Image (cartoon, coloured by chain):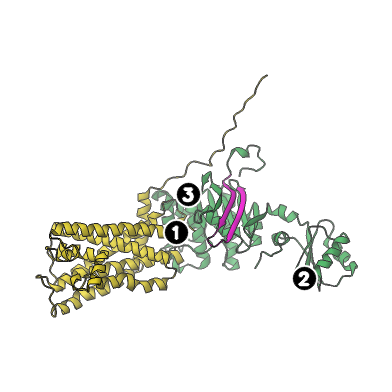
Chain colours: A yellow, B green
Amino acid sequence: MTTITTTVPAPTRLGPPPARVKPLSAFATLSRRRFALSASTPRELLVPLLTPILFAVVIAPALAKMVGIGNGLDYKTYVAVGTVGLLVPLSCMFAGLGVIVDRDSGARRELLAAPIPRPLLVFGNLSVALVVSALQLVALMVSAILRGASFDVSTSGIAWFVAAALAFAVFSYGLAETLANRIPKQEEYIGAVPAFAILPWFLAGSLFPIKALPAGLAVFAKLLPLTHALAVMRYALVDPHGTGLHDIWGMSNPTAMAAMSLAVVAAYAVVLTMVAIKAFNRVAVQ
Amino acid sequence: MVSRSDPLSHLVEPMIEVRGLRKTYPGGVEAVKGIDFEVDTGEVFGLLGPNGAGKSTTIGMLTTTIAPTGGSARLAGFDVATEPIAARAVSSVVFQDAVVDRGLTGRRNLDIHARLWGVDPATAKVRIAEVVDSVGLTELIDRPVGSYSGGQRRRLEIGRALVSRPRVLFLDEPTVGLDPRIRYELLDVIKELRERSEMTIMLTTHYLDEAERLCDRVAIVHAGRIVALDTPEALLATLGREIVEVRMHDHPEAALASFRSKGIAGDDAFSVGSTVTIPWHDGSASQAVSVIGEIGLPTAAISTRRPTLDDVYLRLTGDRLAA
């Protein structure tokens, strides 16, 4: 018996494999897009600056004439650093508005249909929020210096400051992105800004040391990432003895305390970024 | 286009392959109830149905913005669930609503699409110039999209989808909300695209003329299911050469039974509301009118016309397509 065998080709994919977009290239495109959108709405850049600059150049110098903070610290300078804790959350919350606009009337669905890993959309927005916050922060510090604030600048101090500000900004943007994805309406989001961006500022040692708070609130303040970020930033530029860090940790080695506080802020930043990506994915893919 | 009658067609995967695709939203709403279809390379395939039929959910699943709860779908051989990035890389989509960055120029919108779909900058520049010319936006392309009219914006979105030269183009209700003149202009753009390229196009619509004019095959969707799938001509042929509509003063069901008993209407005749619709397969419609008149039933009006896909939909579902 003769057996005739034939090979039936397996079904083939149609055409060559599609070009893979490099994540870094996609990230750069998304960042440029977000920056162009932010630049097209200058109020997004300017409005968050108003209140912190008002505090740094008007209110803090006025209060400095009335109160002393002790430990040889200049109150103007003390509050100038404290206003960073107001500026960064406000700036990031404004960046969160862009997420809502993208979702409601922008190009989010087009971006979701792009052949890129979707968390890049969050990272693209984050990168621009960081750049905008940094520019605003520079403007704030220059304003404070022009008004008489005096910073103790060293290379290691700048490194501590930048690390703390960066980690806190990442945390703040993670919070803003999470809220923007979980809150259905822009009006409700704006209503949530004071609770998340302003209220913690009053409790985190921005205007006075946390040891001046009632005991219960002081414990609560130690849980806030802003308290840790401000203590590290002051240690970096104003308070080399780490008085604010001591109020949190009760230890005597300021560098160790600064490292621990920075770790706390970084941990908050990582967790909130992961939460933000999860919130984004939940809304983006039904 | 790979012909469906080609004996070797089974050796090549269809460009779009959908098997038992299902979507149940949280809360239990079953938007898509297990649909199957294949679309060949170069084919224009339409999903025709009213709002809420499950068309956009189907597109959402194929573009990986909606996660299926059952079944599978492949684009150019790439599974949308397990290879979503590859599936997105071979496709582009024009959404039902405007999905653009209004604060950016038209050119910037196109450039962002090109970059995200992996088109190198030099090629993107050339393609953008071609696309802008073909959709007639040369004068506007460097203006912010916020200043565009609805029709201009939609043309920009179609152009944007073409910049990456997708193998599969999804058009989700591409002309909804546009005034008639712009709608017909856009249909011409899509028709030209169909004639000039080998791109596979899948469009959803609830406009009958769009489906008839543009599609090689149409799937009629009702309540999350495909109730008919064929060429527009074949679907229309099921209703004969002409449709006789008889509007009754009352008792349309009794009239339908009477027409059937006298051999005027067949099993494909149906009644909805006060109207009895009779597909007329043989002879002229004027014959039908005179035969119905001779029966002596109390009719309010009798009219004849060519069948439409709305009639097909009406016969299959008991509902009308057009709002």
Given this view, does label 1 or label 3 mark the residue nearer the observer? 1
Vertical arrangement, residue B92 with respect to residue A210, above or below: above
Quarter of the N terminus of chain B within the rendering: top right
In three-dimensional space, the C-alpha distance between marks 1 and 2, rounded to whole angstroms, equals 48 Å
The label number, if any, that marks residue B274 in the structure image: 2
Q: Which chain letter goes with mark 1? A: A
Q: Nearer the viewer, residue A249 or B172?
A: A249
In three-dimensional space, the C-alpha distance between marks 2 and 3, rounded to whole angstroms, equals 49 Å
Q: Residues within 10 Å of mark 1 (few under 14, many from 20)?
A: few
Q: Position of residue A199 (x, y in %)?
A: 29, 73
Q: Which chain letter goes with mark 3? A: B
Quarter of the C terminus of chain B within the rendering: bottom right
- Residue position marked by numbered label 3 in the rendering: B84
Q: Residues within 10 Å of mark 3 (few under 14, many from 20)?
A: many
In three-dimensional space, the C-alpha distance between marks 1 and 3, rounded to whole angstroms, equals 16 Å
Q: Amino acid at mark 1?
A: Arg
Q: Amino acid at mark 3?
A: Pro
Q: Position of residue A95 (x, y in %)?
A: 35, 66
Q: Residue at 42% x, 49% y: name it.
A: B118
Q: Nearer the viewer, residue A135 or A40?
A: A135
Residue B125 visible in this rendered orientation of the protein: no
Disc nearer the start of the sequence (2/3) = 3
On screen, residue B97 versus residue A165, left or right, reads right
Vertical arrangement, residue B132 with respect to residue B298, above or below: above
Q: Quadrant of residue A250?
A: bottom left
Q: Residue at 77% x, 70% y: name it.
A: B274
Q: Amino acid at mark 2?
A: Ser
**Magenta part of the protein: which range?**
B14-38
Secondary-structure class at tag 1: helix
Q: Residue at 13% x, 79% y: name it.
A: A65
The label number, if any, that marks residue A282 in the structure image: 1
Q: Nearer the viewer, residue A109 or B3?
A: A109
